[in-house]
Amino acid sequence: MDVDPSSERNDSDEPTLRIAAICAAYGNDRHRMLDILRDVQEGFRWVSPRSLETVAACTGLSRVQVEGVASFYSFLSLTPKGRITIRLCDDIVDRFAGLAAVAAAFEAELGIRMGETSADGSFSLDYTPCIGMCDQAPAAMINDVVVTRLTPERAASIGSALRAGRLPLEIAVPGHAGLSPAERAAAMVENNIRHAGPVLLGPVPSDAGLRQALELTPTAIIDAIEASGLRGCGGAGFSTGRKWRAAASEPAERRFVFCNADEGEPGTFKDRVLLTERADLMIEGMTIAARAVGAREGLIYLRGEYAYLRDHLEAVLESRRAGGRLGRRIHGIEGFDFDVRLQLGAGAYVCGEEGALISSCEGLPGEPKTRPPYPVNRGYLGFPTLVNNVETFCHAARILGRGADWFRAMGTDRSHGTKLFSVSGDCLNPGVYELAYGLTLAELLTLVGGEDAAAVQVGGPSGTMVDRANFHRRLSFDDLATGGAIIVFSARRNILEIVDYYMSFFVHESCGYCTPCRVGNVFLHKAIGKFRAGLANPEDIDYLRDLSQTIIETSRCGLGMTSPNPILTTLQNFPLVYSALVKSSPDRVRASFDVQSAIEGARRIARRRSTIFDEDYT
Amino acid sequence: MNETRKPRVATVSLAGCFGCHMAILDIDERLVGLMQAVEFDRSPLTDLKTFTRRCDIGIIEGGCCNEENVHVLQDFRRNCDVLIALGQCAIMGGLPAMRNAIMQSDAPLRECLEEAYITGAYIRNTTHQIPNDPALPLLLDRVYPCSEVVEIDYQIPGCAPGGDIIFETLSSILAGRFHGFSRDSFKFD
Ligand SMILES: Cc1cc2nc3c(=O)[nH]c(=O)nc-3n(C[C@H](O)[C@H](O)[C@H](O)COP(=O)(O)O)c2cc1C
Ligand code: SF4
Ligand code: SF4
Ligand code: FES
């Protein structure tokens, strides 16, 4: 080993000191591991073996524990990344919108292939799942900056501007310097609000709900939420009032209110719009929840893809603190203290699951927790933790302001109020629609200009693929449930190509804890490949059903319990797609087994041909 | 069909250890009755190397590790009405499929052969060559369970399966009343 004292100094001391300073900025607190590693990644473009050791030493953990976290998140890298990392959304919506040509244009301009980093360390090109810009696909992140509506020409010009040394923000938002954080976010990404309803996207008076809540006892606040019939908007639709009551009634010294802004379900981008347009209302809702359950500490878990909203959200938090609406003695009330911290994620869909979200905030790998105990009983650091979706908190604030009856009167019997739908895919007007629960899919399709749809994915990959014969079904928790995603597909689209992509998404995003989810989804994905290649037998349909059932029954969290849905719901609603592709072989020998490719390696090693399977063998 | 004809049975050992065939003998004295009830065609038990006639039942021991296994298995599929995979090797690939675990390699098959014939710690191979007689069948890239190569009708699990389970399963398949194993037929510790 050659030891050069000068390089030793440069390579070891300086970075080590910088990393130690990062850890110190977070009080060397192991629970802040995600923040620490995000900063290391940002400062050095990777988390090197030496960084792992330094971080471990500073936080009192073993290197393996730190590596377990660093290797979990896709935005943290154990190999060096470019100073500029471009992540193209490769969701099926982007693929249908011309992703391949955009990727090729970046490759040509930057001289590297997708998945590669340039030799001088300037650029990396990667794919990433849905970044929440489906209404303006194809889209990409350039470091923390988002660019949308990409074309090959735009990609080439972005690439050349970057090579000329222009900063990503300058490229995405020319003249950004004079803009406020909110204006900058709005200039970077369009909101595409297509239909404003009465609750969220119409005019909203500031803090009307919070002022009303301060007149009420905590129990009365919860009674109002429960009476409104509000159900969680993150996907599962659990009664918000009951959740708040459970969190309030658990005896504890500390309690937490967490806002789930992870929005990872492909096709969902309504929280993005609320975070941009209604951040004040959302924090107001969190403050009301804090009052109701007796929490003093709050947290917003913002997905790493939405890092471009960080400055804006920090500014809103700061202005609320400055106005006495957050922090100590809120609205002058002695003893009513509540403050909120912003936590950024780092590219992991499963971290939207509330247990995984809490693990992630605790500095652990973002793995779901075994339930029970539920977060409302034992959540963050073991204390009762209320986790609600962005939209749920916004609704809660409006319910307090306008009254439970007003909210309850909208929607259907068991799904009250309005819902934000984020619509993308093959329609004329992609964007966000606020509509009362209970409208039919056909009605929504008329609004969005998607009447020609042949299939609609309701609720994202974990939801339901609906065929034309079922467009009369209603959007509500009793019929077609959705956290907000509505993806429209025209008759030009290949259903199995969509299913294939969604299964690869779940394969990529499984945290790996449960074998049926980790391995089973790989098998399901492979089986779909067999169908697409025309090599499937009739009995492979039973195989898909049986394996799906096993995965659903034996998985620990909602990811595994819903991951077979792309297959199950298309088997149900598009049976002909499958039956048209299966072939039974008359002699019952499997066409999917290709003996030629199986012996190719041995043929090369032995340097001879097969006496059995090479027909021209002499 | 002649009403009194006995069902014809064929058996073969592919990539297995012959343990499953030994296990057939574990049905002990019931074997005598079975031999009277059926007629064995192609099988190591009769030393017949080809089918003399179409068979009702084919019993397969072992998975497919080389081209000859594939060829024989396909031949069984084409000549038997019902195929039974007997034992873990036939069902899952079993012990031979341990070589499928060589995954972090660009040339897993070569690595496997080199370890088996040249570099392995306990190898005494004075030629220092991987055997390559033209009569040797070519190996497959990995070991395949039978069900990946042909359709399999029934599986009898175990390594090797017990004599009782073999006897009961065969008897009920022959009687046309096999409807799967009961939940407590298998206990693993
Ligand atoms: C794999 C997975 C991902 C999830 N992602 C999100 C998400 O991005 N945002 C969200 O609000 N809820 C998400 N959820 C649901 C949460 O676990 C939780 O139910 C929700 O945050 C509760 O809030 P709500 O009652 O207001 O809907 C996800 C669940 C699973 C299983
Ligand atoms: S179901 Fe999948 S994502 Fe959920 S805990 Fe298990 S392995 Fe992880
Ligand atoms: S299953 Fe067991 S007994 Fe049967 S062939 Fe394989 S190793 Fe031998
Ligand atoms: S951003 Fe590409 S599909 Fe959502």
Image (cartoon, grey):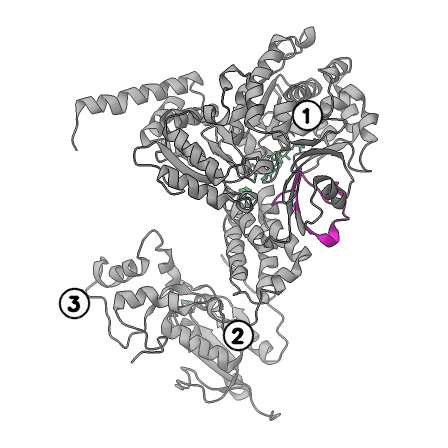
Residue pictured at 33% horizontal, 68% vertical: B139
The Cα–Cα distance between marks 2 and 1, rounded to whole angstroms, is: 58 Å
**Residue A477: x and y, percent?**
74, 41
Element class at badge 2? loop
- Give residue B38's position: percent from left, percent from top: 53, 86
Residue drawn 57% across the image and 78% down it:
B171
Closer to the camera in the image, A450 or B21? A450
Residue at 64% in and 8% down: A323
Where does label 1 land, which residue?
A: A393
Toward which corner of the image does residue A484 lie, by quadrant?
A: top right
Q: Chief secondary structure of the magenta span?
A: loop
Q: Position of residue B128 (x, y in %)?
A: 17, 64
Residue ID for mark 3: B127
Q: Quadrant of residue A353?
A: top right
Q: Amino acid at mark 1?
A: Phe
Q: Is mark 1 within 8 Å of ligand 1?
A: yes
Q: Which residues are magenta?
A: A457-486
Quadrant of the image containing the C terminus of chain A: bottom left
Total marks placed? 3
- Where residue A595 appears, as percent x and y from the top left, is 40, 69
Residue mark closest to the camera, 3 vs 2 = 2
